[in-house]
Amino acid sequence: MLRKAKKQNLSQDIMIQILHGIEAGMWLPGEKLPKENELASTFGVSRNCIREALKALSLNSIIESKPGQGTFISQEALTKIFNSDIFQDFSGETTLIELLQIRILLEPQLAFWATQRASKHDIEKLIEIIRTSNELDGKDLEKLTYVPIPFHQHIAKMSQHHMAIRVLNLIAKGEVIHRKILSLTPFEFQKIGLSEHEKIAQFIQQRDAHGAKKAMYDHLSRALKDVITDMSRFSKWREYNPELGDTLD
C-alpha cells in the first residue's frame, strides 16, 4: 500500500516505496508504472520529486523508459533488488531444503485460489511470463537462477492473498542466496520446471483448481528432490547441512 511521502527526503522515500511495491508484487517485471502525474498525486508530491525518484531507479536498472510508451519495471529489477539486500534478511541457518518445504505447504493452495480468482488478463500475463522464460539463453546461469520467481510471484498475486506475496518474496531471496552458496547449476532442472509451469498454467486456464493445486504440489516436490540430489554432488554439502534427516516428511 503506497502512502504520502515523508517530507524529510521526498524522492528517497518515494524510491523506497516503489522498491517495496516491486518486492510485494504490486508491479511485476515488464509491467508499466503509472504516469508521473498519477504518481505525484498518489504520493502527494510534485512531479519533480517523482522524476528524481524515477531517475535513481533508472540508474540502478530497476526501471526503464520506452519512448512514446512510458516507464516500465525492468526484467532485471528483482535481480537488482535481491542482490542489494539479500544478505540482510537470511542467515546460513535457513537451508534451501527448508525453504522449499515451506513452499510445498503454501503454494499449492495459492494455485487453487488463483485458479478461482484470476481474471482473463491475469492468465494472459501468466502465459506471457512463461513465454519470456522459455526464450532465455540456457547458458546464462545468472538469469536462470531467477527464472521461476515471476511465475510463482504472479500466481500468488492472482490468489489475492497479500501476505503470501510478501512471504514468497522472502523465500525467493533465501533460495537465491543458498543456490549461490552451494554453486548449484539450475539449468539441469530448470528445463523440467518450465514444462511444469506450462502444465500448472493449463489447469489455471481451464479453471481446474484441484488440478492446478496438485500440479503445483508435484512441481515443488520434484524440485525439492532434485535439489537434494544436486546438493549431494558437492563437497560443500556435508559442511552446509551434515544431517539431512527426513526432509520429505
Image (cartoon, helix red, strand yellow):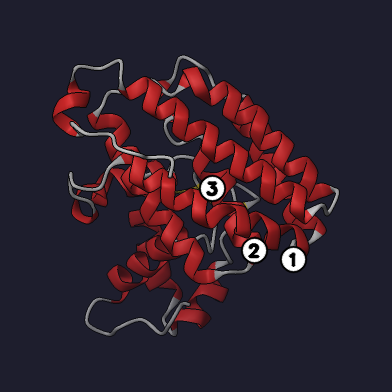
The structure residue drawn at horizontal position 28% and vertical position 39%, both measured from the top left corner, is 177
Identify the disc placed on residue 29.
3
| Quadrant position of residue 44 | bottom left
Q: Earlier in the sequence, mark 3 or mark 1?
A: 3
Q: Is residue 20 left or right of residue 29?
A: left
What amino acid type is highlighted by mark number 1? Arg
Alpha-carbon neighbours of circle 1 within 10 Å: few (<14), some, or many (≥20)? some
Label 3 element class: loop
Q: Earlier in the sequence, mark 2 or mark 3?
A: 3
Q: Is residue 225 left or right of residue 132?
A: left
Determine contact: label 3, label 1, CB under 8 Å.
no
Can you give x and y, in whole percent of width and height, for residue 13 in the image?
Answer: 31, 73
Q: Give the distance between the C-alpha atoms of the residues marked 2 and 3, in whole angstroms.
A: 18 Å
Determine contact: label 2, label 3, CB under 8 Å.
no
Can you give x and y, in whole percent of width and height, for residue 28 in the image?
Answer: 55, 53
Query: From the image, which quarter does the C terminus lie in?
Result: top left
Nearest the camera: 243 or 126? 243
Residue at image mark 1: 117
Identify the disc placed on residue 206.
none
Can you give x and y, in whole percent of width and height, for residue 97 in the image?
Answer: 35, 40
- Rendered position, 103 above or below 165: above
Residue at image mark 2: 159
Q: Give the distance between the C-alpha atoms of the residues marked 1 and 2, in whole angstroms.
A: 6 Å
Label 1 element class: helix
Q: Earlier in the sequence, mark 1 or mark 2?
A: 1
Determine contact: label 1, label 2, CB under 8 Å.
yes
Q: Is residue 136 visible?
A: yes
Can you give x and y, in whole percent of width and height, for residue 88 in the image?
Answer: 19, 54
Name the residue furthest left. 239
The structure residue drawn at horizontal position 53% and vertical position 70%, both measured from the top left corner, is 162
What amino acid type is highlighted by mark number 3? Pro
The structure residue drawn at horizontal position 79% and vertical position 41%, both measured from the top left corner, is 202
